[in-house]
Image: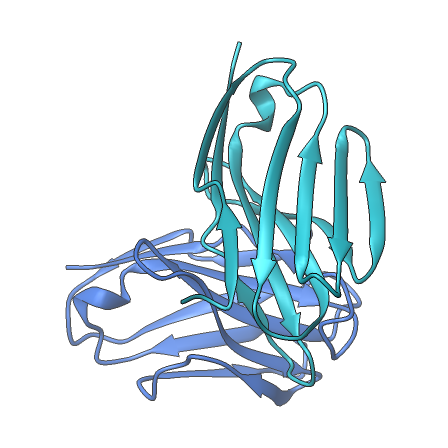
Amino acid sequence: DSGVTQTPKHLITATGQRVTLRCSPRSGDLSVYWYQQSLDQGLQFLIQYYNGEERAKGNILERFSAQQFPDLHSELNLSSLELGDSALYFCASSVGATEAYEQYFGPGTRLTVT
Amino acid sequence: KNEVEQSPQNLTAQEGEFITINCSYSVGISALHWLQQHPGGGIVSLFMLSSGKKKHGRLIATINIQEKHSSLHITASHPRDSAVYICAGRIQGAQKLVFGQGTRLTINP
């Protein structure tokens, strides 16, 4: 158990819908990273927050957005969903702001768009 | 071409064999991570290294920054080592990881 929690575990929704994925980092960790893992693209970095502020952006679509709240939990919002958004979404947390710190991964949320 | 390439893509071996998974990268990186993903999907960080060698139990990771190459070795492999192993490079000057496609390892009893 990494100490990182993600909800929900599974999510099935229809194209065009909007969903919110939630991540609670390990106690004491200030950074939250979001990753997408699809069958054809592998793991891809989406976005990072550190202590409430956006720190780095990767291959995140404009239809996706994220935020980190004062209690350090983070939410990833996916809107106007398409079939290609079906993937495993992982969050990870680390104590520091940079990639120099080890990241601890949550169990993931499996999103299926039908 | 991916910035981070792993080989082999798939590896099947017998219990007890010595396993090597390779990771090469074409960009400047300041550190490299090795991750393990079990069939259930969960990801565990195995190593983070920027030079030399690290060992944890039966797992050994090495990196040669100049040659842009890292290896993950498993000694006395066991069926419970069956998983997908992923390397990821931390791009110099950027706050992000770039991932290899993963190596699916199957250890047969």
Q: Where residue A93 appears, x then y in whole percent?
A: 67, 65
Colour convention: by chain
Q: Where residue B53 appears, x then y in whole percent?
A: 84, 48
Q: Quadrant of residue A13?
A: bottom left
Residue appearing at x 61%, y 56% in the figure? A105
Rendered position, A94 above or below B92: above
Residue A104 vs residue A101: left or right?
left
Residue appearing at x 20%, y 74% in the figure? A17
The answer, for residue A101, to whether it is visible in the render is yes
Residue A35 vs residue A104: left or right?
left
> In the picture, which chain is blue?
A
Q: Where residue A110 appears, x then y in whole percent?
A: 36, 54
Residue appearing at x 66%, y 23% in the figure? B18
> In the picture, which chain is cyan?
B
Residue appearing at x 65%, y 51% in the figure? B34
Residue B36 vs residue A11: left or right?
right
Rendered position, A24 above or below A52: above
The answer, for residue A1, to whether it is visible in the render is no
Q: Where residue A84 appears, x then y in whole percent?
A: 22, 66
